[in-house]
Image (cartoon, grey):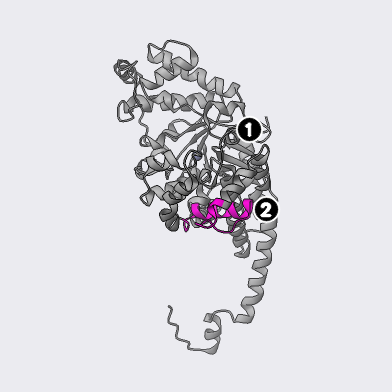
Amino acid sequence: MRLISCFTVAACIALAPAAPSAQKPAREAAAAIHERVAAAVGAIRLVDTHEHLSAEAVRLKGEMSLFSLLHYVSSDMWADGLDRAASEAALGRSSLPLEKQWEMIAPYWTNVRTTAYGRALLRAVRDLYGVNDISESTYLDISKRIREANRPGWQRQILEKAGIDVSITDIGITGAALDPSHLRAVLRLDYFLVVPQGVMVAEREQGVTIATLADFEAALDRAVAAAREKKFVGIKSGVAYERSLEFGEVDRAEAERLFQELKQQKGKPGRADWTRGKALQDYMFGRLAEACAKYDLPLQVHTGFFYDTWRNLAQANPTLLAPFVIRHRNTRFVLMHGGYPYGTELLAMAKNLPNVTLDMCWTYIVSPSFAARFLNEAIETAPADKVLGFGGDYQVAEGSYAHAMLCREVVSKVLAGKVADGYWSEAEALAYARGLLRENAIRVFKLNQ
Ligand SMILES: [Zn+2]
């Protein structure tokens, strides 16, 4: 509250809020701007920078149900106490009766239906399957509708309904075989950071023997060259899940010594141990960045929040990566997920570092209000060609659909708001939208080639 003492009538008039009659035309004008911007944004064919969608043949193999669509909703349920291992063994498996699957999620669904992940699922089920709620009395009907709709062409139809032109998906080496008319792929090569497991994978994939660090470096170079050859549009790193994004500058002799030491474990099975050989990991990530520059592929790096539970968020703060980005000036970095919740830090990096592009993939369903704040700040801070505005980040097209619709709403609201505020013209807002949702991604991933 503000206390104002008025000494003159004129001062009182100047300080008083606008009369209701003056506010009404302003509100109507803002609504008209919003309506026009939303229509234009709704008509943009999206270039979707990040998904985990497989070829449709994969979803046609299984019997789908409501429980096959949970994806991120499961993560919120794990955070709410649902046992992850038990749920992964049961949900979306046709071997377990739907009644049992509903019993497992019902207590958690009550608590996560309110999150944006939950809202996205409700929206997909409503818009694509015509059922308005997910509850004890609807899950069987929804599951039946999903099962019946799951025929050849349905995945593509959902993406069409979302206005998605092309999706860049992250599903491993099989990405090379996707239908390039609407699906492209990025490849992960993080295994080159861990020895001996990475050595074993590279030897198997390339049919070579790797005895020295030089051999390993040559194998990495060949892997990136092959990715380019197979038309992958970028290299993706999810290394923030495993370790800190702080990568030191490492002497090659030190890396060679560590390589020989860790390689002694070769042949012993087991998961990669990311707690060992940090300096060697740092060194190899540098080689990966260099290979991306050499073969002109952007390096997508996961920053910020995680898909699953029990992760140390601080290790994924994008600012940890800044010294590495500065040392690798010829590499084009795409820093993902708006760095949530380190959004402002990520924006400062994009504003400062010429080789950083931001990607808002995943952000709208993590939190639409964060996404709106982030976009507002992004417009004000980052050059317009350095912001990628949409990536669904789903394993099922239904999720990509709901996310795309939410994205268009948030983007329209933010862009129109800035027109109403006098920040820019409507024409400028719409030009920005075309770059944000389409043209920037085509350029960054060279999709026209
Ligand atoms: Zn992802």
Residue 307 is at least partly visible in this image:
yes
**Drawn side of residue 28 relative to residue 305, left or right:** right
Kindly identify which residue carries mark 2.
Answer: 42
Could you tell me residue 120's position as x and y percent?
54, 52
* Span colored in magenta: 113-140
What x and y, as percent, mark residue 38?
Answer: 66, 58
Q: Is residue 289 left or right of residue 27?
A: left
Q: Position of residue 182 (x, y in %)?
A: 66, 36
Up-down: is 119 above or below 193? below
Q: Nearer the viewer, residue 294 or 230?
A: 230
Disc 1 is placed on an element classified as loop
Q: Which type of secondary structure does the marked residue at label 2 adopt?
A: helix
Which residue is at 45% across, 49% downward? Answer: 343
Quadrant location of the C terminus in the rendered image: top right
Tell me whether the residue at label 1 lies in contact with that at label 2, contact meaning CB atoms closer than 8 angstroms: no
Q: Is 366 or 73 nearer to us in this picture? A: 73
Dot placed on the residue nearer the N-terminal end, 1 or 2: 2
